[in-house]
Image: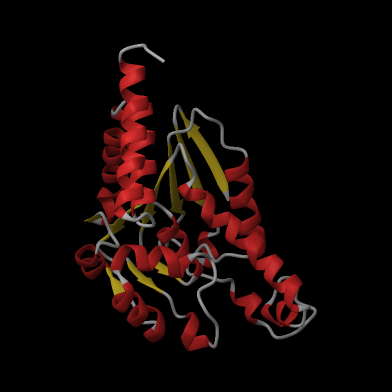
């Protein structure tokens, strides 16, 4: 995995194109480290995959039931339950930071986004897909569950019954359907992906930083708060904005 910084925009690139950017615990640790190292000047994080696929999910080597395979399912399944859960909690940390206060995250998705790849795309605030892209959460069909924050982010986006169907069947969701369901913010030809992501990032960063961050925080809290609590959050945020605009308290 590599990162590149351009002003207020940080780009994180999965760079195992020969393995279709398949992920390992090292991937998740590296992602978590990027999140931990964010500074206050970063406004947008773009997540992308090198090559023809965003990410084909879990590296095949980790499906081994051999307890000697480091980080493999066989090793993980033989640990005490508390230790297994702690490891998964750390893995989830590589995904959850993509909705941290102060940043907006954008996934640039081409080709396949399967399992952990789909969950990484879903962890972002926004998604731009190429016309050949598809998302898939096949974990249940493999005897597992989506455990990298995917159930909450998917349900937020498409609702309870659709999320249930997508998770239980493990079927692919092609780009056109993803756009219809709200999983994708835009679908573009493959050669237009960079331009579309760049235009979206430019539009996000054009707004004043304080207003942008307060608005993002309000939208995120709206999926959890009851109306009264959300109304109060809006009042408090607007009071802070007005005070800053007039140079007051």
The correct choice, above or below, for 92 with respect to 68 in the image is: above
Q: Residue at x 53, y 49 (%)?
A: 97
At which x and y percent is residue 96?
Answer: 52, 55
The correct choice, above or below, for 206 with respect to 123 in the image is: above
Q: Residue at x 33, y 52 (%)?
A: 222
At which x and y percent is residue 68?
Answer: 80, 79
> Which image quarter: residue 113?
bottom left
Q: Residue at x 29, y 29 (%)?
A: 207
In front of the other: 102 or 206? 102
The correct choice, above or below, for 190 with respect to 76 in the image is: above
Q: Is residue 118 visible?
A: no
Left or right side of 79 for 30 = left
Q: How many marks?
A: 0
Q: Is residue 132 visible?
A: yes
In front of the other: 174 or 190? 174
At which x and y percent is residue 105?
Answer: 41, 46
């Amino acid at each position: 995995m590599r990162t590149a910084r351009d002003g207020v925009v940080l780009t994180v690139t999965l760079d195992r194109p020969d393995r279709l950017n398949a992920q390992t615990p090292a991937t998740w640790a590296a992602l978590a480290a990027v999140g931990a190292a964010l500074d206050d000047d970063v406004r947008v994080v773009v997540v992308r995959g090198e090559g023809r696929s965003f990410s084909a999910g879990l590296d095949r080597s980790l499906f081994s039931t051999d307890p000697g395979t480091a980080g493999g399912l066989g090793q993980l399944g033989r640990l005490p339950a508390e230790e297994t859960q702690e490891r998964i909690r750390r893995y989830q940390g590589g995904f959850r930071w993509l909705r941290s206060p102060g940043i907006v995250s954008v996934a640039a998705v081409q080709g396949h986004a399967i399992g952990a790849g789909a969950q990484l795309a879903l962890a972002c605030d926004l998604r731009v897909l190429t016309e050949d892209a598809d998302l898939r959460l096949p974990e249940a069909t493999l005897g597992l569950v989506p455990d990298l924050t995917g159930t909450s982010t998917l349900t937020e986006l498409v609702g309870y019954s659709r999320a249930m169907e997508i998770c239980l069947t493990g079927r692919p969701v092609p780009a056109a359907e993803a756009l219809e369901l709200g999983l994708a913010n835009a679908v573009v030809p493959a050669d237009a992906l960079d331009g579309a992501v760049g235009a979206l990032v430019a539009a996000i960063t054009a707004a004043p930083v304080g207003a942008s961050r307060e608005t993002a925080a309000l939208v995120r809290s709206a999926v959890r708060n009851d109306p009264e609590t959300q109304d109060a959050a809006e009042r408090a945020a607007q009071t802070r904005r007005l005070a800053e605009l007039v140079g007051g308290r």
